[in-house]
Amino acid sequence: METVKLNEAQRKSRRNRNVALGLVLAGLVVLFYVTTLAKVGGFWN
């Protein structure tokens, strides 16, 4: 099996993309959590 060797720029680009994706996912989790609390808590009646 042959593996792909990434150069430094590709590794940095992949890491930045992964960090950005993680931040987006974390933001969505927080958004859904706050929305759920607001609906269940009765803030918007």
Image (tube, helix red, strand yellow):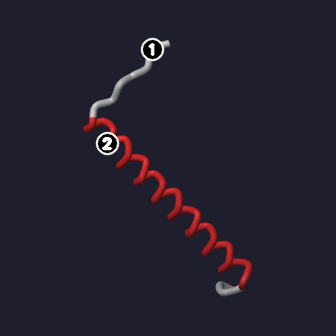
Q: Quadrant of residue 3?
A: top left
Q: Count up the numbered dots.
A: 2
In the rendered image, residue 4, in percent from the top left (x then y), is placed at 39, 22
Three-letter amino acid code of the residue under disc 1: Glu
Give me the residue at 63% from left, 70% from top.
33
| Residue 41 position (above or below residue 20) | below
Q: Quadrant of residue 28?
A: bottom right
**The disc label shown at residue 33, or none:** none
**Tag in front: 1 or 2:** 1
* SS assignment at label 1: loop
| Residue 43 position (above or below residue 18) | below
In the rendered image, residue 43, in percent from the top left (x then y), is placed at 66, 87
Q: Which residue is mark 1?
A: 2
Q: Is residue 9 left or right of residue 42?
A: left
Q: Quadrant of residue 5?
A: top left
Q: Is residue 25 left or right of residue 17?
A: right
In the rendered image, residue 17, in percent from the top left (x then y), is placed at 38, 47
Q: Which residue is mark 2?
A: 13
| Residue 43 position (above or below residue 28) | below
Three-letter amino acid code of the residue under disc 2: Ser
Give me the residue at 61% from left, 75% from top.
34
